[in-house]
Image (tube, helix red, strand yellow):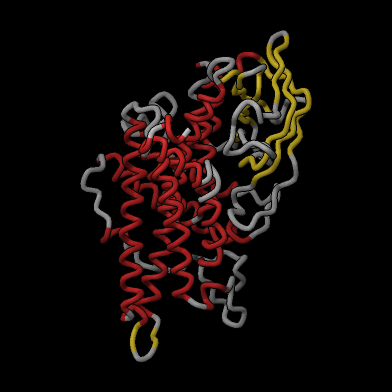
Amino acid sequence: MSVLDDVAATEVDRTQDRMSHDVWLPAETVALRAEARQAVREKLAPYARVIGQREESVDSFPWEAFRGLAQAGMFTVPFDAEFGRGLEYPMLGTCTVTEEIAYESSSMAGVYDGQCILVPQALSFAAPPLRARLLPALTSGDEAFSFATTEPDASSDLSVDVMQTVAVEVDGGFRVSGRKRWITNSVVATWAAILCRTDDRMTMLLVDLKRSPGVRIGSPDLKMGHRGQVTADIVLDDVFVPRENVLGQVGSGLSVAISCLTRGRIGIGAAGVGVAQAAVDLAVHRLRTRQLFGGPLGKMQYWQFKMAERATEIECARSLYQKAAVRLDRGDRAAEPEAAMAKAFGTRVAVDTVRDALQIHGGYGFARQVSETGESVRLEELYRDAKILEIFEGANELQQWVIARQLIGRDVTG
């Protein structure tokens, strides 16, 4: 059987169920985790290995899993009762779902982050009629949405001086020209929240990608990993955007973007936890079943101590993203330094744990597939996927700077 066929993931025990105890989480979040795990098992798992291996293209966008998760109610989690579930802790719930998705597919967690964390926060700044028109299509999965701040020369640095996408005010709205890069879902998205320079400030605009003359979507990027998170350039050539599509106020685009990216960082921290949890579960399974020198590999004290260390780090990373999410749900707009800590620590733990799990599996971890027998372990995919978590939504070096500014003071750090 080819790895590109529908291959189920290796059946392993979920060590989280005996190592992590939700002693303080709200009952709604505990129940949502169980619901999300079932939805992932039914709607994502059958496609996950194919999603992780096939090369990016417009046709490879994972609509089956995307719409399956939406049909299971996962896209309603971030929203109030008018459009969604009306949870008391929606950010905590959304991050919990993200972790469960990432356990099975890190790239699908990236897709979910765009659709259900970044874009919903951007749309919270939209006028009520626009929200009412768009949110049903988002929560149902009928339409994909994009969030676009990054440019070829503007990523972690979103200062107005480097922003090259320009919106010029005209009668009834704006004319927008520029290029956005690495934009998740762009090859299939109907709408995109796009950060633009307006004079000496920035403005976030909602652009109709399908019906606006002057919009061109580039070819899908071919990446090392996260192949299910299909990205491409958005090129805008004198695109008209009506004034009612301003998100927030004219000139307030940077604050809108930062509020979205803060949430996105917490979500990516949660994704890192899901990836690390998947890797440690595979590692534990291998340590228990692999016989070496007359006994199980897990008898070696080095790996006992290493996995104990990783399990502790995973638990710390999980607590960090949960704490940051709860701070947002309680009305703290910044949620720092926990948001930066959750992103930087959770994603580093993911990379470190996947690397250790691959080492434990030896050649089986390095191989995409053993051709003679058809055996396949997920670790090659997890290894390719994990690295991007340390880069996007604000590189981890940037997160360390955010933490240092809180710790030492901006008057010293700048």
Classify 271 as above or below 401.
below
Classify 25 as above or below 42.
above
Give percent across and percent down for residue 14. Answer: 34, 62
Q: Quadrant of residue 373?
A: bottom right
Give percent across and percent down for residue 79. Answer: 42, 30
Q: In the image shown, does 234 or 324 lie closer to the viewer?
A: 324
Residue drawn at the location 57% of the way across and 49% of the way down = 64
Q: Is residue 307 left or right of residue 377?
A: left
**Considering the image in quadrants, where does the N terminus appear?**
bottom right
Q: In the image shown, does 326 or 395 lie closer to the viewer?
A: 395
Hey, which residue is sitting farthest front in the picture?
412
Give percent across and percent down for residue 209. Answer: 69, 30
Give percent across and percent down for residue 128. Answer: 50, 16
Q: In the image shown, does 339 or 407 lie closer to the viewer?
A: 407
Hey, which residue is sitting farthest left in the picture?
23
Q: In the image shown, does 240 or 36 lie closer to the viewer?
A: 240
Classify 28 as above or below 228.
above
Q: Can the viewer see residue 111 in this picture?
A: no
Q: Quadrant of residue 356?
A: bottom left
Residue drawn at the location 55% of the way across and 52% of the way down = 388
Hey, which residue is sitting farthest top in the picture?
171
Q: Can the viewer see residue 206 in this picture?
A: yes
Classify 12 as above or below 272.
below
Residue drawn at the location 55% of the way across and 67% of the way down = 380
